[in-house]
Image: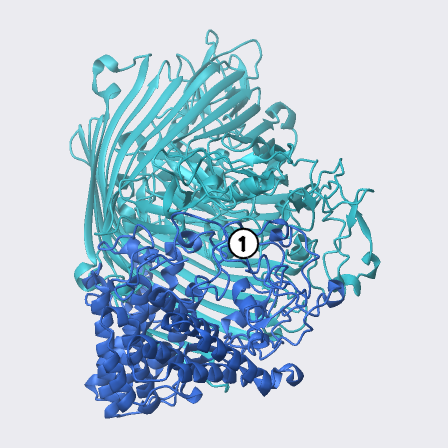
């Protein structure tokens, strides 16, 4: 009996020692690996926003550039299969669950605490995001959004309504900036104070009116902003994200650089047409050519159908004469045979990927922070250059990735206002705006990381003047305002290198530039997309969403009749 | 099944001194040659008899006039054997008679099988030990109806997926609970990386159990059987009793058993390649990924091969000319080479087990076990070593208090190659196997240098050097896993009265797992080098306190059961360190890397449960069992944390109930059973509250400022989360017919799971990425059928066949409102989906666009158009699985064979489709100059007439570009296991020190045929490239299966 007591006692002791902890239930509900949301700090939330914002813009640009021939369209033979619904998930996610809840938190919190500068900046960024989502998808959830499982399937608002709400956000932001309180710490775009953000907000309001000019956008409103507000008309006011050069942990470089300048060659194909435009169309070479593109191969005539399968393919029969075929400096693009290695892809060449990643043209110095193209224009014996021409050198080339993501630049303001002057009766000189836009764009590019530029190969002032003069001459020779607008849109597009959204919107709104390279394959049913597929995460997880039948549905401001090529 | 009918033995022993007329002796063994200890032998028609000793031997005096012995043993068929002229009579007994079988049920309580209202399958040690596999679950494969066991791969020590009666949870775990010696055993599969970067090869922690040290395994399949285990038992329970935990007989004599096994471990199959065409594209020899190059035997004008049959040497390229000058300008024969054959090896598996059982003193016995296993895989980089040390001590004090204890310590080390997935070329992350199988025929992989002599980086045949050389991978990568684990139990039992006893048992299971993944710099997928280490310390502490009662109410009525409480604490602590950018080549310390990222995670979960059962027995033919348990969890908010779930089941033995059926030789036994069980499921911890996203070092600005951030977390914490509910109705019939020669065990079940906790992806426009909610419903209905038939049964020869049939049909009844599908495994655009009114887990992926008639649409370039939306590619679940067993016993020789036929289901498989699309498989040996027109219609609806090259057709229309073309019927036939064993007869070893000497030859995965695949692929579809979990039906070129053949010897003294 004594033993029983002894053992029972032992058992009880064991129960008490281990058991007590095992009986806790409430104590284990809070996650010990994180803190509760009320510990959020506004400056730190803004940091997340600032970084996610550049990710969003980068993604928007990546998705839009191929359509407007700013990078090669190489994922689909036709517009409707260049991208599928899943390709837009990332953009939708970045906007809706990374950015906007943080921005809403900042706006609510800053409004409550009367930190108007914070609120204004957040509203300006939110407006840009909402404009962009409408531009790409049309009707989108807004008024029922952001409520978690309270509204698990938010209904879409009309595109016009969301656009209007975004414009109202800009107006509200401008009111906040009129009475600025607080200063944002660690602003990754501007100084943290209200001034430059107000400049941006005014410019985005003009952009709103120009974009909607066929759907109620008002020239008078633009005139009013021009007369009263400060707008982004100097390079120093550019809205852009400055990348760093930290290679890893975290990789803080421009994504184009991380992609191409490390190992194994670039994943991107440049657009043959875009490259060719910069040396094969005008008498004068575009001064930005060596900054925009960095070739890896000097001569592509010695390739076979394996590395460059279009070498044996005929020029597409449905194309007008005169476009570059196969590569930009191939036989048709460079009839004199004085350039080599502008190795991109034709529009809609979705063939498999041959082992050409150490041969194709890479993103250059601007805006990727890559290398300036200081190579001779042609090298016939490829073997001598093999290895030394390539850009994949473990992140040691060029500006080491310290590039920028252009979001909205002062040069673009001028091109945009030129359109407003030509089409909306805005009181401005379109020719003068075109020239300023051109000169600002060239100047920005040529003053970008000058330390890694081979000065001997940098364009001279005379070369720049000659180029500008040639463009202005073409402008003067244009038959009418439509032709002038066509020319302005083309120059605008060339100035947007690295940011596809503005040209993608401009093309749909104006139909210009009018003679871009057609797709390689013909199709009676695939026209230039007027909206994107809705993202799969939206269609699949939202009971009120359904996928569109085709890509022909238009955004409310896109009303110019006819299909685009 | 060495069950000792102690009482019976003693009684028989007492009466065995009959008048001697004739002395008969011999050995009594089971089918596998195992001696049966304590089997009773009676001289028919007399009271004289004996029991066998520890070696299974007996000797008996048989009176004149008697010529028949009656041999009986619990769980075995009673046999009557005629005496011949010889005085030596060895008798083999067969298992299978269910009449008086005692099985282990919930909480380790042993009960008469006939009283159970639910299905339990019990396997004895002879069905588990001396097998090539180290993994207890794999040893069970094919032996238990209703249990679906799949290996993830053939890699030494890789994980195993176990699913009982279908998947009932959508995004939660569907793995069963393992209980070892009465205590929950952590059987997680811990991955540091996702399946796409090698996580699928991680071990499942039941690997820490030594199959050679198992006395018995019981599989509780239905919810009426598992109620006592609480919510953790909702996916079924695998009850393992180790030899250390099974010291039933406290007076066991000193016995030592030694097992030694050797097995050869090979890759199960290699594809048949064609030998006519080499590396290149469009019939032109080049350093492509593909094998659509020139013909080896005929030269054409422009095929890239010189007239002398040579091409430029693959290493004659500018980047290598300075470091490998011998190849500058060198030529290379364009011919077929053997690569795969040279790449793989035959690994050796050696396994030693020692078991010592001894009685220390009156009432105290111990069992000691030690096992060592050393395993080499079919590639040099794959090894597995394990030590299992165990001790069990039982003691009974004079006052009646009994103390039962087990202590086990395990250490193991597993070394594996990195195993990422691949879809046709380079893998995601580093991976050994991805870059070996599609090696073009004209590349002599074995004969080429694999590393750059200057910087040790990988070099390969491709001009751009963009394939990591598999030999470089072998030398420069490693995925290592070390575990040390302690688990043990201490139980105190005390008999309060003759009908009531009390028990307290505490169990502890704790392991430390260290993983180390390293890749030197210089490769292709992780060019800068990586070192990732992780530590996990997981513990389970489980207390059980209960009262067991067993009362006879009247002559006809018995009542027994248990009332108790269970408290369980489960903790996990993990730290991860990731270093990237190696500084000095081949030094793999964290200090030698430039960038570091660390992470830690802890979680704790408590569960309190109270349970009670009552089993009412009427006249040995009707039993009614009622059970209930109430659980309280720490993972749900207070309002939702408690849940009660009951079960009820009944058993009716018709052959006992009706006088007319008793002692019937045609229908020997008929039992009907019916059960209804319920269970709950709790979410993982910390799903009910929102948290703040915190992130450091997000970005370093151009000025060098480090940016850290806060953010609204993307997961929505759901405070209203409740437990999920499972309910199952089960009906069964057990029969023995024709003098017990034919047995049937049938179960039908219908399981409905509702309020299922799902990890729900939200439309991001809700502001959140995902949440956890109770929303879905799923049903599983199935049939389990076991059949056994003694075809021949004589005293010397017994031939028995058995078969088991498993069919489970699942249906997703409901998902969250507005959600018609969700992906839970794989990728969002290619994975296993739950789709309303479809079987659970259907595979969706990209499909080819079709016109209204269902014809494939061809684009203007002659290749198929991809549809914008995903489509269903098939159901990965087999329609049914049938296992066939053959057991032959002939004079001490036992032959066992197990064959599996799995019918239906699909598998998305990248290895065969890639080998086809890349022109390597034997099936691609045709005239490749003939153009091809893809079957289908053009976009305008007219029949396709666009000619394309065979290269283009096979490459772009053949599978690599369209998911739809990579899906195969997964039906297969497999000779899973064969063993032949022979026990030396007692007459030979009589004068040796040995009690038994048994030799066994065995092999597993000896032959297979996948019926839906190209024959040349020789493909074994029994792999799970998504790893252990809910995904299935994917083979992503990560690791093929293995085949093991070898032998064992068992000696006992």
In the rendered view, tell whether residue B500 sits above or below residue B634: above
Q: Where is residue B603 drawn, in percent x and y?
A: 36, 65
The residue that label 1 is drawn on is B420
Q: Where is residue B340 drawn, in percent x and y?
A: 67, 43
Residue toward you, B587 or B1 = B587
Q: Quadrant of the N terminus of chain A?
A: bottom left
Q: Could you tell me which chain the residue with mark 1 belongs to?
A: B
Res B900 visible: yes
Res A15 visible: no
In the rendered view, tell whether residue B408 sits above or below residue B627: below
In the rendered view, tell whether residue B501 sits above or below residue A440: above
Residue toward you, A341 or B138 = A341
- Relative side of A539 to A81, left or right: left
Q: Colour of chain B?
A: cyan
In the rendered view, tell whether residue B677 sits above or below residue B554: below
In which quarter of the view is residue A545 placed? bottom left
Q: Secondary structure at mark 1?
A: loop
| Residue drawn at 22 percent across, 67 percent down | A160
Q: Where is residue B828 drawn, in percent x and y?
A: 39, 53
Residue toward you, A348 or A483 = A483
Chain ID, blue in image:
A
């Amino acid at each position: 009996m004594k033993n029983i007591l002894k053992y029972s006692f032992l058992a009880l002791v064991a129960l008490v020692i281990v058991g007590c902890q095992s009986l806790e239930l409430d104590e284990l509900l809070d996650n010990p690996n994180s803190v509760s949301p009320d510990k959020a700090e506004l400056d730190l939330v803004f940091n997340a926003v600032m970084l996610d914002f550049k990710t969003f813009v980068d993604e928007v640009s990546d998705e839009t550039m191929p359509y407007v021939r700013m990078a090669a369209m190489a994922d689909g033979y036709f517009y409707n299969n260049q991208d599928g619904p899943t390709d837009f998930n990332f953009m939708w996610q970045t906007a809706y669950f990374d950015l906007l809840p943080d921005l809403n938190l900042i706006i609510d919190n800053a409004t409550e605490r009367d930190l108007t500068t914070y609120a204004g900046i957040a509203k300006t960024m939110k407006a840009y995001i909402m404009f962009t989502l409408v531009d790409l998808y049309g009707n989108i959830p807004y008024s029922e959004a952001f409520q978690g499982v309270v509204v698990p399937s938010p209904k879409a608002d009309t595109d016009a309504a969301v656009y209007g709400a975004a414009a109202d956000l800009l107006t509200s932001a401008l009111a906040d900036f009129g009475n600025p309180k607080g200063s944002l710490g660690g602003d990754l775009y501007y100084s943290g104070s209200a001034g430059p953000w107000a400049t941006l907000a005014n410019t985005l309001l003009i952009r709103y009116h120009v974009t909607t000019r066929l759907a109620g956008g008002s020239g008078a409103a633009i005139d009013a902003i021009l007369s009263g507000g400060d707008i982004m008309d100097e390079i120093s006011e550019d809205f852009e994200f400055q990348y760093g050069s930290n290679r890893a942990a975290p990789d803080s470089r421009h994504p184009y650089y991380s992609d191409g300048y490390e190992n194994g060659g670039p994943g991107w194909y440049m657009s043959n047409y875009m490259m060719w435009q910069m040396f094969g169309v005008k008498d004068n070479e575009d001064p930005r050519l060596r900054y925009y593109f960095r070739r890896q191969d000097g001569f592509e005539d010695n390739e076979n159908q394996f590395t460059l399968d279009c070498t044996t393919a005929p020029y597409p029969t449905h194309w007008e004469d005169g476009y570059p075929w196969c590569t930009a400096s191939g036989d048709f693009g460079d009839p004199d045979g004085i350039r080599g290695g502008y190795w991109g892809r034709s529009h809609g060449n979705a063939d498999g990927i041959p082992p050409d990643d150490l041969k194709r043209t890479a993103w250059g110095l601007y805006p990727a922070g890559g290398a300036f193209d200081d190579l001779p224009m042609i090298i016939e014996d490829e073997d001598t250059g093999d290895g030394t021409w390539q850009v994949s050198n473990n992140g040691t080339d060029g500006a080491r990735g310290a590039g920028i993501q252009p979001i909205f630049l002062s040069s673009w303001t001028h091109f945009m206002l030129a359109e407003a002057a030509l089409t909306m009766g805005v009181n401005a000189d379109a020719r003068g705006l075109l020239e300023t836009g051109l000169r600002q764009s060239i100047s920005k590019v040529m003053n970008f990381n000058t330390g890694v530029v081979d000065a001997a190969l940098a364009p001279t002032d005379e070369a720049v003047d000659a180029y500008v003069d040639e463009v202005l001459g073409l402008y003067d020779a244009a038959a009418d305002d439509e032709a002038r607008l066509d020319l302005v849109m083309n120059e605008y597009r060339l100035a947007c290198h690295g940011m596809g959204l503005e040209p993608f919107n401009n093309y749909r709104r104006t139909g210009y530039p009018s003679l871009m390279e057609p797709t390689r394959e013909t199709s009676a049913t695939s026209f230039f997309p007027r909206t994107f597929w809705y993202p799969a995460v939206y269609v699949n997880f939202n009971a009120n969403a359904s996928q569109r039948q085709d890509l022909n549905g238009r955004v409310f401001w896109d009303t110019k009749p006819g299909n685009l090529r | 099944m060495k069950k000792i009918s102690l009482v019976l033995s003693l009684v028989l022993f007492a009466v065995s001194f009959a008048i001697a007329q004739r002395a008969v002796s011999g050995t009594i063994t089971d089918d596998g040659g195992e001696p049966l200890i304590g089997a009773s032998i009676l001289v028919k028609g007399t009271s004289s008899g004996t029991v066998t000793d520890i070696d299974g031997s007996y000797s008996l005096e048989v009176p004149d006039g008697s010529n028949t012995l009656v041999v009986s043993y619990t769980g075995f068929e009673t046999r009557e054997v005629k005496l011949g002229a010889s005085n030596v009579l060895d008798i083999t007994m067969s298992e299978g008679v269910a009449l008086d079988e005692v099985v282990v049920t919930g909480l380790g309580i042993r009960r008469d099988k006939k009283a159970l209202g639910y299905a339990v399958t019990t396997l004895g040690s002879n069905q588990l030990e001396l097998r090539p596999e180290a993994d207890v679950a794999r040893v069970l494969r094919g032996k238990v109806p209703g249990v679906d066991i799949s290996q993830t791969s053939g890699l030494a020590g890789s994980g195993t997926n176990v699913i009982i009666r279908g998947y009932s949870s959508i995004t939660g775990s569907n793995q069963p609970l393992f209980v070892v010696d009465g205590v929950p055993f952590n059987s997680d599969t811990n991955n540091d990386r996702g399946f796409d970067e090698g996580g699928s090869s991680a071990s499942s922690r039941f690997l820490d159990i030594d199959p050679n040290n198992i006395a018995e395994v019981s599989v509780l399949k239905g919810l009426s059987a598992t109620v006592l285990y609480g919510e953790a038992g909702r996916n079924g329970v695998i009850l393992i009793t180790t030899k250390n935990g099974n010291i039933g007989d406290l007076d066991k004599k000193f016995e030592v058993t030694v097992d030694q096994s050797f097995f050869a471990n090979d890759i199960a199959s290699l594809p048949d390649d064609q030998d006519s065409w080499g590396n290149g594209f469009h019939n032109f020899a080049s350093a492509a990924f593909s094998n659509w190059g020139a013909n080896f035997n005929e030269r054409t004008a422009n095929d890239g091969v010189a007239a002398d049959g040579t091409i430029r040497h693959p290493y004659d390229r500018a980047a290598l000319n300075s470091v490998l000058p011998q190849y500058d300008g060198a030529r290379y024969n364009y011919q077929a080479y053997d690569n795969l054959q040279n790449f793989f090896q035959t690994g050796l598996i050696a396994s030693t087990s020692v078991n010592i059982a001894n009685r220390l003193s009156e009432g105290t016995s111990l069992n000691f076990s030690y096992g060592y296993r050393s395993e080499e895989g079919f590639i040099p980089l794959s090894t597995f070593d394990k030590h299992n040390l165990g001790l069990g001590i039982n003691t009974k004090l004079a006052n009646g208090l009994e103390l039962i204890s087990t202590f086990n310590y395990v250490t193991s080390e597993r070394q594996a190659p990195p195993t990422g997935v691949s879809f046709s070329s380079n893998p995601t992350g580093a991976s050994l196997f991805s870059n070996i199988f599609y090696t073009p025929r004209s590349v002599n992989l074995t004969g080429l240098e694999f590393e750059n002599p200057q910087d040790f980086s990988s070099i390969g045949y491709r001009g751009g050097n963009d394939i990591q050389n598999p030999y470089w991978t072998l030398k420069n990568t490693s995925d290592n896993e070390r575990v040390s684990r302690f688990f043990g139990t201490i139980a105190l039992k005390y008999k309060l009265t003759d009908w009531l006893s009390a028990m307290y048992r505490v169990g502890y299971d704790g392991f430390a797992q260290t993983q180390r993944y390293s890749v030197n710099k210089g490769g292709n997928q992780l060019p800068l080098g990586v070192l990732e280490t992780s530590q996990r310390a997981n513990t389970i502490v489980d207390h059980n306190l209960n009262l067991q009662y067993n009362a006879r109410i009247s002559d006809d009525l018995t009542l027994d059961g248990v009332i108790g409480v269970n408290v369980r604490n489960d903790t996990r602590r993990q730290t991860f360190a990731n270093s990237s950018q190696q500084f000095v080549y081949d030094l793999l310390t964290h200090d030698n890397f430039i960038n570091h990222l660390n992470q830690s995670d802890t979680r704790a979960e408590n569960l309190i449960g109270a349970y009670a059962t009552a089993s009412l027995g009427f006249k040995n033919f009707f039993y009614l069992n009622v059970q209930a348990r109430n659980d309280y969890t720490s993972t749900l908010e207070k309002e939702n944390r408690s849940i009660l779930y009951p079960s009820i089941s009944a058993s009716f033995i018709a052959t006992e109930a009706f006088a007319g059926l008793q002692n019937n030789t045609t229908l020997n036994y008929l039992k009907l059973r019916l059960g209804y069980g319920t269970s709950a499921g709790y979410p993982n911890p910390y799903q009910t509250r929102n948290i703040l996203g915190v992130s450091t070092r997000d970005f370093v600005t151009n000025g060098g400022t480090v940016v850290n951030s806060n953010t609204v977390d993307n997961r929505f914490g759901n405070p209203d989360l409740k437990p999920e509910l499972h309910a199952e109705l089960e009906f069964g019939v057990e029969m023995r017919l024709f003098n017990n020669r034919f047995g049937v065990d049938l179960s039908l079940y219908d399981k409905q799971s509702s309020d299922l906790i799902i990890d729900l992806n939200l439309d991001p426009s809700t502001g959140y990425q995902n949440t956890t909610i109770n929303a879905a419903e799923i049903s599983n209905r199935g049939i389990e059928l076991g059949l056994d038939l003694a075809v021949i049964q004589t005293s010397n020869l017994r031939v028995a066949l058995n078969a088991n049939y498993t069919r489970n049909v699942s249906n997703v009844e409901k998902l969250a409102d507005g959600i018609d599908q969700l992906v839970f495994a794989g990728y969002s655009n290619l994975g296993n989906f739950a789709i309303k009114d479809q079987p659970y887990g259907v595979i969706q992926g990209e499909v080819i666009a079709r016109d209204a008639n269902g014809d494939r649409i061809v684009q203007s370039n002659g290749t198929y158009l991809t549809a914008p939306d995903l489509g269903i590619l098939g159901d990965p679940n087999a329609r049914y699985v049938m296992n066939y067993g053959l057991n032959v016993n002939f004079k001490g020789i036992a032959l066992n064979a197990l064959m599996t036929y799995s019918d239906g289901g699909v598998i998305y498989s990248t290895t065969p489709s890639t080998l086809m699309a890349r022109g390597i498989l034997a099936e691609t040996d045709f005239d490749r100059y003939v153009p091809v027109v893809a079957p289908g219609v053009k976009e305008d609806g007219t029949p396709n007439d666009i000619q394309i090259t065979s290269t283009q057709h096979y490459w772009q229309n053949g599978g690599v570009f369209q998911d739809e073309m990579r899906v195969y019927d997964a039906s297969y036939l497999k000779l899973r296991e064969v063993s032949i064993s022979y026990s030396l007869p007692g007459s030979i070893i009589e004068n040796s020190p040995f009690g038994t000497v048994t030799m066994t030859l065995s092999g597993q995965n000896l032959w297979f045929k996948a019926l839906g695949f190209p024959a040349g692929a020789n493909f074994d579809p029994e792999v799970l490239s998504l790893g252990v979990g809910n995904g299935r039906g994917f083979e992503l070129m990560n690791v093929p299966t293995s085949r093991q053949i070898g032998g064992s010897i068992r000696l006992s003294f």
